[in-house]
Image (spheres, rainbow, N blue to C red):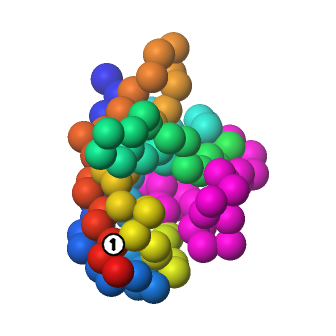
């Protein structure tokens, strides 16, 4: 049974930083493409970043140079380091993976004030 548990969200001022964590169980994170998505109020869920099986990372243009996705294989955990946060980064952030179907965590709230 695949389970993803996000943590690390919070409230910060613009320009601040947060590190989100996604602890995976039921899968080996390093054998899968792990993703971060976010959903702001009234908007559709938006893909943010991916770390592929081989370690290649990709990002949506709006976070390039500010966010970094990484993986700790020993902890079976994926991270999203978010720097230079902007109010428009405010959203619920979700970790997601496809293992036959999409699996999602419960989400963690990130609120950035100006």
Where residue 57 sits, quadrant-wise, is bottom right
Where residue 110 sits, quadrant-wise, is bottom left
- Residue at (55% x, 49% y) in the render: 48
Please give the residue where the numbered disc 1 appears in the rendered image. Answer: 112
The stretch drawn in magenta includes residue 69 = yes
Q: Is residue 113 left or right of residue 97?
A: left
The stretch drawn in magenta includes residue 79 = yes
x and y percentages locating residue 42 in the rendered image: 32, 39
x and y percentages locating residue 34 in the rendered image: 55, 42
Towards the viewer: 72 or 87:
87
- Residue at (43% x, 54% y) in the render: 77
Q: Tell me, yes or no, if residue 43 can be seen here.
A: yes
- Residue at (39% x, 39% y) in the render: 43
Kind of element beneath mark 1: strand
Q: Is residue 50 left or right of residue 43?
A: right
Label 1 Cα neighbours within 10 Å, binned few <14 / some 14-19 / many ≥20: many
Bounds of the magenta segment:
53-80
Where residue 8 sits, quadrant-wise, is bottom left
Q: Is residue 14 left or right of residue 6?
A: right
* Total residue callouts: 1
């Amino acid at each position: 049974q695949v389970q993803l548990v996000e943590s690390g969200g919070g409230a910060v001022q613009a320009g601040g930083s947060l590190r989100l964590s996604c602890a995976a169980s039921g899968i080996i994170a390093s054998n899968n493409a792990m993703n971060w998505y976010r959903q702001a109020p009234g908007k559709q869920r938006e893909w943010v970043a991916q770390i592929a099986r081989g370690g290649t990372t990709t990002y949506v243009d709006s976070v390039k140079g500010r966010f970094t996705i990484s993986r700790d294989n020993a902890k079976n955990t994926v991270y999203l380091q978010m720097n230079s946060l902007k109010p428009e980064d405010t959203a619920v952030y979700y970790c997601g993976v496809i293992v036959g179907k999409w699996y999602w965590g419960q989400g963690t709230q990130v609120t950035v004030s100006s």
